[in-house]
Amino acid sequence: MIMKRSGRWGVRVGLLLGVVLLSGCDFLFSPGEFKPHVYLNWKSEDTATTMQVHYHTQGAFVESAVYYDTESRGGDASLYRFKATGTRYTWPGTERAVHHVELKDLVPGQPYYFITGDATSGFTPERKFKTLNPDSPRLRIANGGDMGTGELYGKITEIAASYSPDVALLGGDIAYEDGNPQRTRLWDQWLDVWTSKMVTPEGFTVPMILAIGNHETNLLKSFSERKIKAPFYYSLFDQNSDERSFFVRKLTRDSTLFVLDTAHLYAPFGKQREWLVDAMEKNKSVRTKLAMYHAGIYPSHRSYYNPHNMLGRLSWLKIFDHFKLSMALEHHDHTMKRTKYLRDGKVVAAGEGTLYLGDGAWGKRGRDIHRDSWYLDRAEEFTHFWLLDLEDSQIAAQAIDEKGQVFDTHAMPRISASAWKQIRIPRFVNDSREVRQQIEQNQELRPYLELLKGE
Ligand SMILES: [Fe+2]
Ligand SMILES: [Fe+2]
């Protein structure tokens, strides 16, 4: 099974290689600057009893393995009570294997100590992580995107880690390699900083959940060959058992995160939109729904009428409003923004609409903003990350810059659990044909129909 997956991908790379060579590119990966890079995310929506561990090896290895325990074992593989094995991708043209090992049947909110590797490739030093606790009175989130590999990225990451977040929600544009497999070095630099700095003062490695951004993809029109269009996004993070770049993650017992793709690999109005309606229906009874995606639908730098932003509004806004989305995390503009509460394209009272936070500047320098837009409550040109404390009665949000200064705070009220129980959300009436027609009739949006190829 493992070799089949790696092999099939290799064949696909091979098939496209000829085409790519014609365009003067080389689709083989460059070797980069190898390090074992141990990092964490999830492959299933269950963040309480599973964890996915990734690590890299160079040259010979025996298996993809993680040894783990609820107590420290000092890095001695023979002492850990549990072991899990997984899959790996070998980057074509290199000796580098990226290993993915999913741990299952874990205890919620439990610290685990672990090492990765085998006797041939060597073992990595012991690290520890904590599964999310669905019943914890507070979930602490660090959110941002548009990072890059510069000094500001390192500074923000260090500050974010100092707040001991339970999870990092990364909204795309991570290493800015543009889906070019020759730019392995950028990912090595990004991962080197992430794995060394995104460790809390208590020593926990912080797991991440990633949305895809435009800078994770290349310009190839191979929408049916997504692993070639976004070679690092898939091979490094393996967040789904299929190729979907949109998925659900449970955050707590009464909060769910919807991770979406703003037209980088999937059209927001095609299969993804049908999936979103279905996923929202399934999570209808969940009190707090968060969404994370790359390109905002209420931008603070780009124009409100930018086609990409219009596409998001046209595809998703009705769904967000219908299912009472609490908060949307947006990125891509390299600015800081917090909107007013919005519903049906209008400003509403707190608690009656969705709050849109953004706009992706965890490392990138801020761009200019259009502060006077009707939907913005606060916008700044600052590099920052968002710290979100999800508590029973509110989501406390703080924007924090590279000096550690908190320059914006906002408390979003959460509806009480008992009041939420009284609310009935009717079934969403399928309107995909109308949405499709509107896109076909709009000259600026029509090119996005190409994304439907291969769906
Ligand atoms: Fe960006
Ligand atoms: Fe972007």
Image (tube, grey):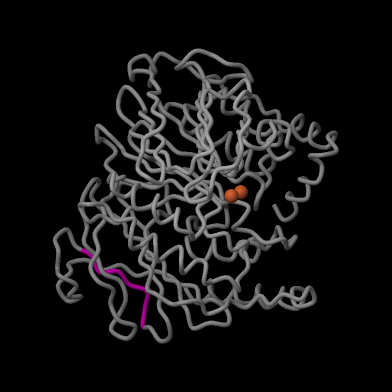
Q: Is residue 222 above or below residue 19?
A: above
Measured as percent of width and height from the top left, residue 441 is found at 85, 34
Front-most of residues 380 and 121: 380
Q: Is residue 281 visible?
A: no
Is residue 332 visible to us here? yes
Say if 278 sits above or below 208 in the image.
Answer: above
The answer to whether residue 172 is magenta is no
Q: Please tell me in which quadrant of the rendered image residue 125 appears.
A: bottom left
Quarter where residue 154 is shown: bottom left
| Residue at the image point whose x is 75% and y is 53% from the top | 453
For the residue pair 55 and 26, the one nearer the viewer reads as 26
Between 201 and 42, which is closer to the camera in this rendering?
Answer: 201
Q: Measuring from the top left, give residue 224's x and y in whole percent.
A: 70, 59
Does residue 270 sit above or below 299 in this rendering?
below
Q: Which residue is drawn at 33% across and 16% down?
A: 418
Magenta stretch, residue numbers? 62-68
Residue 329 percent coordinates (x, y): 50, 37
Q: Which residue is drawn at 76% across and 29% down?
A: 434
Give left or right: position of 134 versus 283: left
